Image (cartoon, rainbow, N blue to C red):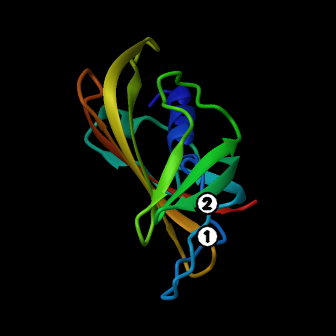
């Protein structure tokens, strides 16, 4: 994966991309919330996948993002309101996560920037599914699964992330 692609993923995950909070949803009727600044750490452990991008070396990387959530008509959405912008201009903005009853989830479609061995970039359609699940210790455990739909990087790639209040 290209170094700029990590920033793209940061933008996608930023909660991904970038993401722990004042939420853990309990058995009560508490309204979930994801507000404030969170340090999102990407590349927690090795990447996995069938895409050649899964084998590209990348180190652990942490960025801080601001989140604001709101709930209306039974739907809760957390939006990234501050932090580094994705380096990939095809990543939809703003990045928003929806509460599904146990996790904050986000799906996006964008163009993957596949870095070739000669350092040129080939663009390909991709779809990412990101999930941040509150943990008992107040952090969020995240997983980003991306399907790269064509081109030399075609396949899937998955990486773990964590989010904790900054």
Q: Secondary structure at mark 1?
A: loop
Residue 49 quadrant: top left
| CA distance for labels 2 and 1 | 6 Å
Q: Tell me the element at label 2.
A: strand
Q: Is residue 61 visible?
A: no
Residue 53 spot, x, y in % from top left? 37, 33
Q: Is residue 98 left or right of residue 4?
A: left
Q: Give the residue displayed 57% in from the left and 82% down from the top.
A: 136
Q: Residue 151, which numbered label?
A: none
* 49 to the left or right of 46: left
Q: Is residue 110 left or right of residue 97?
A: left
Specify the farthest residue to the front: 73
Q: Residue at x 52, y 24 (%)?
A: 88
Q: Quadrant of the N terminus?
A: top left
Q: Is residue 75 above or below residue 43?
A: below
Give x and y (percent) for residue 138: 63, 75
Callout 2–callout 1 Cβ contact below 8 Å: yes
Percent position of residue 16, x then y: 54, 49
Q: Quadrant of residue 54?
A: top left
Q: Please report whichever mark, 2 or 1, sits nearer to the chain's N-terminal start.
A: 1
Q: How many numbered discs? A: 2
Crowding at label 1, few (<14), some or many (≥20) Cα neighbours within 10 Å?
many
For label 1, the residue is: 139
Residue drawn at the location 63% of the way across and 53% of the way down: 40
Q: Which mark is residue 163?
A: 2
Q: Is residue 58 above or below residue 119?
A: below
């Amino acid at each position: 994966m290209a170094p700029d692609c990590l920033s793209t993923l940061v933008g996608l995950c930023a909660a991904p991309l970038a993401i722990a909070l004042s939420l853990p949803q309990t058995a009560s009727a508490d309204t979930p919330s994801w507000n404030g600044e969170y340090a999102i750490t990407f590349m927690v452990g090795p990447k996995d996948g069938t895409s050649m991008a899964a084998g590209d070396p990348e180190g652990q990387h942490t960025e801080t993002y601001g989140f604001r959530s709101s709930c209306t008509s039974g739907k809760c959405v957390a939006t990234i309101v501050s932090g580094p912008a994705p380096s990939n201009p095809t990543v939809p903005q703003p990045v928003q996560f929806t509460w599904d009853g146990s996790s904050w989830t986000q799906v996006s479609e964008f163009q993957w920037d596949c870095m070739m061995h000669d350092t040129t970039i080939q663009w390909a359609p991709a779809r990412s599914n990101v999930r941040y699940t509150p943990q008992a210790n107040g952090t969020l455990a995240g997983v980003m699964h991306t399907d790269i739909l064509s081109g030399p990087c075609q396949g899937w790639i998955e990486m773990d992330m964590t989010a904790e209040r900054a």
